[in-house]
Image: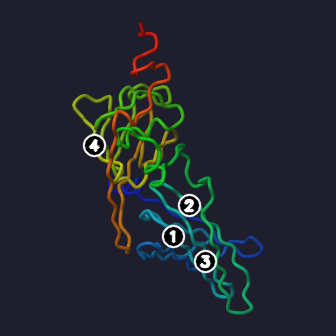
């Protein structure tokens, strides 16, 4: 079980290294480096020119490829999130002089290396999307084909309907089962969105590390550090006078139909 759970909170980078004619280059040296922590992984391409770095901690990476007789290529700005696969194909040019080509670009928008369907809320979205209760599990209602009633207190959203299945959502925390809302006696472990780095939603075509439900998986990922010292503070101040009244409210906040 350790490998599937690790894959649920980590990501991977894979791709093919080719020459100018499009032929695969075997035995090319490939290095992946986490720009935030300095973590490095080194590998070689196989006979088909294919390489893969699995179970990479989340963060921003660069991939450097070198081979005798070719210019070295380095691609930076590769974002790796929970359960994501970045497909980075590298084309090497024949070298006449010592040259290194640096490409500053992220991976493709789509993930051809995965078959599941879903989306990921980034840290920026988690911090800025409206959330009355500050409970990140309510973010599930930002996904398509999901209905239900959010919880405005420090608790679990109610009556979630995902992909036509009522109450069939598997909430995970860092890749481990946190709650299954249709099982009696199991309750959600609450956590403030201050501690959340991203949330990965998988609605169909579950990869091996996900599943255990027929509705949707919501994998909440907590923050991890880098080599830079940093911190944050938060304060929530909300008064009744600051809240917008419902559209049908009359004077004093009462429903217009109740006015006498």
Left or right: where 227 falls relative to 73: left
Pointer 1 with pointer 2, Cβ within 8 A: yes
- Mark 3 packing: few (<14 Cα in 10 Å), some, or many (20+)? some
Q: Nearer the viewer, mark 4 or mark 3?
A: 4
Q: Residue 165 lies in what quarter of the image? A: top left
Q: Residue 250 lies in what quarter of the image? A: top left
Whichever of labels 1 and 4 marks the residue nearer the N terminus, that label is: 1
**Which of the numbered marks, if any, corresponds to residue 231?**
none
- Mark 2 packing: few (<14 Cα in 10 Å), some, or many (20+)? many
Residue to which mark 1 is pinned: 61
Q: How far, Cα to Cα, is label 2 from label 3?
A: 15 Å
**Which of the numbered marks, if any, corresponds to residue 190?**
4
**Which of the numbered marks, if any, corresponds to residue 86?**
2
Vertical arrangement, residue 21 with respect to residue 236, above or below: below
Pointer 4 with pointer 3, Cβ within 8 A: no
Whichever of labels 2 and 3 marks the residue nearer the N terminus, that label is: 3
Residue at image location 63% in from the left, 68% down from the top: 105
Whichever of labels 4 and 3 marks the residue nearer the N terminus, that label is: 3
Q: Residue furthest bottom?
A: 97
Q: How far, Cα to Cα, is label 1 from label 4?
A: 31 Å
Vertical arrangement, residue 235 with respect to residue 190, above or below: below
Residue 232 x %, y %: 34, 61
**SS for dot 1:** strand
**SS for dot 4:** loop
Vertical arrangement, residue 233 with respect to residue 99, above or below: above
Residue at image location 60% in from the left, 73% down from the top: 75
Q: Nearer the viewer, mark 1 or mark 4?
A: 4
Residue to which mark 3 is pinned: 74
Q: Residue furthest top?
A: 260
């Amino acid at each position: 079980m350790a490998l599937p759970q690790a894959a649920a909170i980590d990501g991977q980078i894979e791709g093919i290294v080719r020459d100018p004619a499009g032929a695969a280059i075997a035995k090319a040296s490939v290095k992946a480096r986490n720009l935030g922590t300095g973590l490095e992984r080194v590998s070689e391409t196989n006979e088909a020119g294919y390489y893969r770095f699995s179970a990479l901690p989340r963060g921003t990476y660069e991939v450097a490829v070198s081979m005798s007789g070719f210019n070295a290529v380095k691609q930076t700005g590769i974002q790796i999130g929970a359960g994501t696969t970045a497909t980075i194909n590298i084309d090497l040019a024949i070298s006449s002089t010592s040259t290194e080509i640096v490409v500053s670009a992220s991976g493709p928008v789509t993930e051809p290396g995965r078959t599941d369907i879903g989306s990921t809320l980034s840290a920026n979205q988690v911090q800025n999307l409206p959330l009355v209760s500050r409970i990140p599990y309510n973010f599930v209602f930002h996904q398509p084909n999901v209905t239900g009633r959010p919880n405005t207190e420090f608790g679990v959203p109610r009556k979630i309907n995902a992909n036509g299945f009522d109450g069939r959502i598997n909430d995970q925390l860092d890749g481990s089962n946190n709650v299954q809302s249709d099982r009696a006696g199991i309750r959600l472990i609450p956590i403030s969105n201050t501690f959340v780095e991203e949330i990965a939603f998988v609605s169909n075509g579950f990869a091996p590390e996900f599943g255990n439900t027929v509705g949707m998986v919501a994998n909440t990922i907590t923050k991890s550090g880098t080599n830079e010292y940093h911190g944050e503070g938060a304060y929530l101040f909300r008064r009744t006078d600051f809240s917008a009244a419902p559209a049908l409210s009359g004077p004093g906040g009462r429903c217009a139909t109740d006015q006498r």
